[in-house]
Image: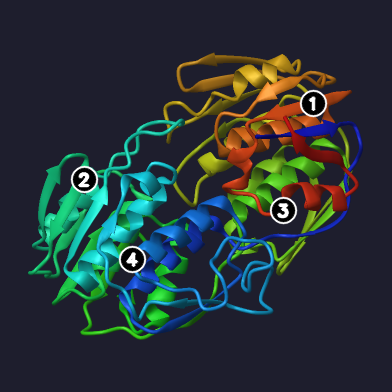
Amino acid sequence: MDKIVIEGGIPLKGEVVISGAKNAALPILAATILAPGVHELYSVPPLADIRTAGRLLGSLGIKFPQGPPGRSGTPGSSGQDAPLLVDSSGLEGFEAPYELVKTMRAAVLVLGPLVARQRRARVSLPGGCAIGARPINLHLKGLEAMGVKITLREGYVEADARRLNGADIYFDTITVTGTENLMMAAVLAKGTTVIKNAAMEPEVGDLARFLTAMGAQIEGIDTDVLTIHGVKELKPASYIIMADRIEAGTYMAAAAITKGEVTLLNAPMPHLTAIMGKFTEAGVRLSAEPGRITLQPGGALHGVDVRTLPYPGFPTDMQAQFMALMSLARGASVITETIFENRFMHVSELVRMGADITVSGNHAIVRGKKTLQGAPVMATDLRASASLVVAGLAAQGLTEIHRVYHLDRGYANLVEKFSGLGARIQRMPE
């Protein structure tokens, strides 16, 4: 097991290229199940979750002619130069085993495409996770409305889809993976499916555009009402995965907290409105043009209130990183978490570094301090890990971050990218 050691207090400077979005790449990889043949995917990030997805697809008979996804140096992992090839011609399985689903909840995304193409699926229930329960009952309710027989047996969802018909589906609460799973099932269903109160996250729209590139008929992309007209078959597609808005926001936080001058290249500008708005409100100087955001040192940071919401609101995946930034802002800020009930586990670790944060229910009151102090800290989940890196870059002295395997799930080449910006950061064995 590795740790990351940071000597803080150095302003970041330079350019950093934002990688492809993990939360778009995972459902798009699952969607390759729907169309037999060779797909070409560009900007697939080299991440642990992507490697897990590759192992899951491989267990179903899908092949990767030029190497599996998620490994640095694999075609498709470093930009748009060469695609990741995904050959779904030999699909033969229909099961997502517990051994894989337990390490990555997004593995449940194979349920929809397996139901659509194989007309059956056996997928392990994902269970809870560190940041709170994320049940799939809305996925199953939607599939049942489409005529799928659902049985829960020995911790698995068993789906029999000999009949797969379009249906009108309304989500009581917004669900990203539920929207994605049902959209993938609906593209090969008989008739028309309407999904109301659908998630509008950009990654859902990216999946919809990939499905459209395969020949799916989807109306209302990027809105909360999706209308899918089922087609008889889909064809393989070539597609460039969108840039990661959360990675972009994390590097923005790191630049701002160190009072650095950093330019983000390949930044997904249209999807960063809420994040950029809060940074600007906090006194961060930034300039933006298509695909490029530059942050420059400015005056003192000011505390601002944040409330996490489904897109287009402020994303829950940026809450921890923004909290680290607010820990060095003048005045107080109130951060309200409305998406996940356990997403304040990073607070105790930031407090170990000298932050003044009090939690009351789903509110965190952050009173800005002049400095943070380096300390040994423990990462509890992916975005909590990122917040500790952000804090460590600004803290005085050495910060040691343990359990950094969480970072491997969502940040491509993080140590190398920060080193390229001048940070004193290294990864080493415990």
> Residue 225 appears at what percent x and percent y?
30, 62
Which residue is label 4 attached to? 60
Q: Residue at x 69, y 67 (%)?
A: 73
Query: Pointers 4 and 2 in contact (CB under 8 A)?
Result: no
> Residue 280 appears at what percent x and percent y?
73, 44
Query: What whole-number distance in Å separates the C-alpha atoms at marks 3 and 4?
Result: 29 Å
**129 horizontally vs 40: left or right:** left
Which quadrant of the rendered structure holds the N terminus? top right
Q: Residue at x 11, y 70 (%)?
A: 165
Q: Amino acid at mark 3?
A: Asn
Q: Which one is earlier in the sequence, the residue at label 2 or at label 3?
A: 2
Query: Pointers 1 and 3 in contact (CB under 8 A)?
Result: no
Q: Amino acid at mark 2?
A: Tyr
Give the quarter of the image for residue 333.
Answer: top right
Q: Nearer the viewer, residue 293 or 375?
A: 375
Which residue is label 2 attached to? 156
Of circles 1 and 2, the one toward us is 2
> Residue 284 appears at what percent x and percent y?
79, 42
Which quadrant of the rendered structure holds the C terminus? top right
Q: Residue at x 32, y 45 (%)?
A: 98
Q: Which one is earlier in the sequence, the residue at label 4 or at label 1?
A: 4
Query: Pointers 2 and 3 in contact (CB under 8 A)?
Result: no
Q: How would you rate the neighbour count of disc 2 (Cα within 10 Å): few for under 14, some for 14-19, many for 20 or more?
A: some
